[in-house]
Image (tube, rainbow, N blue to C red):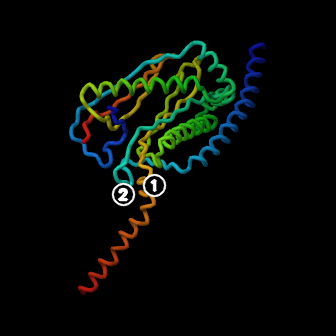
Amino acid sequence: MAILISNLELVPGRRVLKHLGLVQGSTVRAKHAGKDLLASLKNIVGGELKAYTELLQESREEAMARMTKQAEAVGANAVLNVRFATSSITAGAAEIFAYGTAVVLE
Amino acid sequence: MKDLVVFGILFVVGYFAGRWNERRHYASIHQREDALSGVLVFSNRFPPAGAGRVGTKLVTGSAVISEDYFKGVVASLQNLFGGRIRSYESLLDRARREAVLRMKQEAKDLGASMIINVKFQTFAIGGRNPNAVRGVEMLAYGTALSAAPRAGTALSDAPKAGTALSAAPKAGTALTSRA
């Protein structure tokens, strides 16, 4: 069963039957040294760093997948009020964190 | 001396390539903003009244935009004096608009007509490390409301809601009749 993920507090037209508490997922990623070399060249001319966009997007999906897994484990069918947070751990690595409230919707 | 020549070359290349890249990016942003103007974006927490039972889905868009050498040098100079750092303002503007466009595209692919509860997040890649690759990530996320037939009417419902309001004079007449 697919879990509904939303950053709304209430889903229109559906009642929350049960609150199951906070669920979260996070991942720490570092970039590839070769890609970093290309990115540093891009730093001279400007423009989008596609490798970084993809890296962060993938990490965000991973964090969300882990959050969804946790929601499944507690028996939820939706995660509401989802938020993201990003922080740099060291120069080369970033943590991507996703969290939300697991609920049972009717 | 050699360092100065390298610096000069990077500075000039950064200026021209950066300007060219920025102009091209803005052209693409303007074009796609027009193409995606059908998807409405709100920062409201709740859907507009009359939206009915709709499907919801989280949509995200993100972009990492790098500064160029020229912008970096100019910004570090401006940093000494404080005040407005114009070279970075356009960078953040581009990143944010690009992120919104990608989010809108995702919503459009889902057949949604609006995105509500939009939140933004900014992340500086490289942090304060001067040797790291420097860029800024902008993330935009929100909830796409997808009920193609209903959501469309929800907005065009506005005049209908107006008629509901224009029922008010009727109540008024009820009052006047009593008077």
Picture quadrant of residue A96: top left
- Left or right: A73 in relation to A44: left
Callout 1 secondary element: helix
| Marker disc for residue B50 | 2
Instruction: Please tell me whether residue B168 is drawn above or below residue A100 in the rendered image.
Output: below
Point out residue B134 in the picture as x, y percentages from the top left corner: 58, 24
User: Which residue is labeled 1 in the image?
Assistant: B152
- Amino acid, disc 1: Gly
Sort mark 2 into few (<14), some (14-19) or many (20+) by Cα contacts within 10 Å. Answer: some
Q: Chain of mark 2?
A: B
Which quadrant, please, contains the C terminus of chain B? Answer: bottom left
First along the sequence among labels 1 and 2: 2
- Left or right: B109 in relation to B117: right
Instruction: Please tell me whether residue B96 is drawn above or below residue B69 in the rendered image.
Output: below
Point out residue A73 in the picture as x, y percentages from the top left corner: 26, 25
Sort mark 1 into few (<14), some (14-19) or many (20+) by Cα contacts within 10 Å. Answer: some
Observer-nearest residue: B6 or B179? Answer: B179
Which quadrant, please, contains the N terminus of chain B? Answer: top right
x 26%, y 36%: residue: A103
* Number of the front mark, 1 or 2: 1
Point out residue A66 in the picture as x, y percentages from the top left corner: 36, 23
- Amino acid, disc 2: Gly
Look at the image and tell me whether residue A64 can be seen: yes
x 69%, y 37%: residue: B24
